[in-house]
Amino acid sequence: MDGLKRKAAASVLLMVSLGHLLNDMFQAVIPSVYPMIKESLGLSFMQIGAITLTNQITSSLLQPLVGYFSDKHPRPYGLVAGMCFTLAGLLMLSMADSFPLVLFSVALVGIGSSVLHPESSKIARMASGGAKGMAQSIFQIGGNMGRAVGPVMVALIVVPHGQGSIRWFALLAVVAIWVLAKISSWYKKQLELYGRSKSKFDIENDTHLSKRQIAIALTALLVLMFSKDFYTANIQNYVTFYMIDKFGLSVASSQYVLFAFLASTAIGLLIGGELGDRYGRKYVIWFSILGSSPFAMLLPYCDLTWTIVMAILVGLVMSSAMSAILVYGTELLPGNVGMISGAFFGLSFGLGGIGSALFGWMADLTSIQFAFQLTAFLPLLGIAAYFLPNIKE
């Protein structure tokens, strides 16, 4: 019987990752079509940043609230409702012919994401079998793969056939709704077995950290996420423009560079989860953010080939921090998995949105190449990991 339960939990974990893949692939459609809508609607770089800001702020402001509410009042089929918002946003984006309508469309997609992340993160923890870091990595790798596949799908489908072809992604949103309905059914059974407050493998707060230590640790995590997410936002949203401006690549070719970066982040995330479970999350956080700084600082001064190599190395190293940061946060405040997950994912999206708008404004004032040179110093803030206390499991 235990073997059957483990197999069921493993299948749920894979389905959660698949749901995350589809959700974040839809999210990736938005920055991938920026060159197209910038030209067709005559938008500035600052307006492009505002689109990202709308999408990510919508998601980031709601995620902690959704997580807090789900900790207190779980709604297993809320995942399905959230994906319905995403479906509506994609259909509207395929027909958007004005800047305000684009903003409203991406806001709907953001609302769908705000429901999926905290709830799915909690379900991944329930299905972890105790390997919380690896479970979070498997969950998050789905999202990273979705963001990596999104630009390629846009290059193959939307670039040749136009904005209206975004509606084909709506069919995949229907598939996502079916997958999330299956997950929700398992989630409902777990709530009946174990109750709403904790999963079977949540740890108790036996670290004996003082409130001051916890406050310092949370502040350090905030600095680390600022460093990681501001830099990642610049790469993810503007590397296509950078490659077009500096090396004269086509729009389609620049999408493959973005794919290479996002694919490397998926691999790094999986490695980070395994190393965090085995050797400790603090050391993974140290290595991932500060360790990516040499590659980030070299990237703006390389030729085409080495620019791609540096982007891949930055993605591989820096991405290994996310699951470690998230699990570390839930261990600081155990029993609040939904709220912590929502807060951290929301913070990640919010910082990314603010960073995107800021870098767009900077690129308008100076150049896209100068923006990349300036942001290269952000990973040096990884030194803040020094202030994280060791947590015994």
Image (cartoon, rainbow, N blue to C red):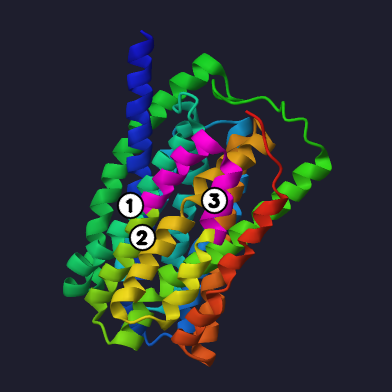
Residue 58: image quadrant is: bottom right
Q: Nearer the viewer, mark 2 or mark 3?
A: 2
Is residue 42 something that shows in the picture?
Answer: yes
Give, as a three-letter code, the residue at label 3: Phe
Q: Nearer the viewer, residue 312 or 5?
A: 312
Picture coordinates of residue 315 (x, y %)? 41, 60
Q: Nearer the viewer, residue 50 or 355?
A: 355
- The reply to whether discs 1 and 3 touch (Cβ–Cβ < 8 Å) is no
- The stretch drawn in magenta includes residue 288: yes
Residue under label 3, please give it: 345
- The stretch drawn in magenta includes residue 291: no
- The reply to whether discs 2 and 1 touch (Cβ–Cβ < 8 Å) is yes
Question: Which segment did they paint magenta?
Answer: 266-290
Label 3 secondary element? helix
Mark 1 is surrounded, within 10 Å at the Cα level, by few (under 14), some (14 to 19) or many (20 or more) other residues, namely many
Residue under label 1, please give it: 145
Picture coordinates of residue 43 (x, y %)? 41, 85
Label 2 secondary element? helix
Q: Residue at x 51, y 50 (%)?
A: 322
- The reply to whether discs 2 and 3 touch (Cβ–Cβ < 8 Å) is no
Dominant secondary-structure state across the stretch colored magenta: helix
Q: Residue at x 39, y 40 (%)?
A: 138
16 to the left or right of 209: left
Residue under label 2, please give it: 262
Q: Residue at x 50, y 69 (%)?
A: 294
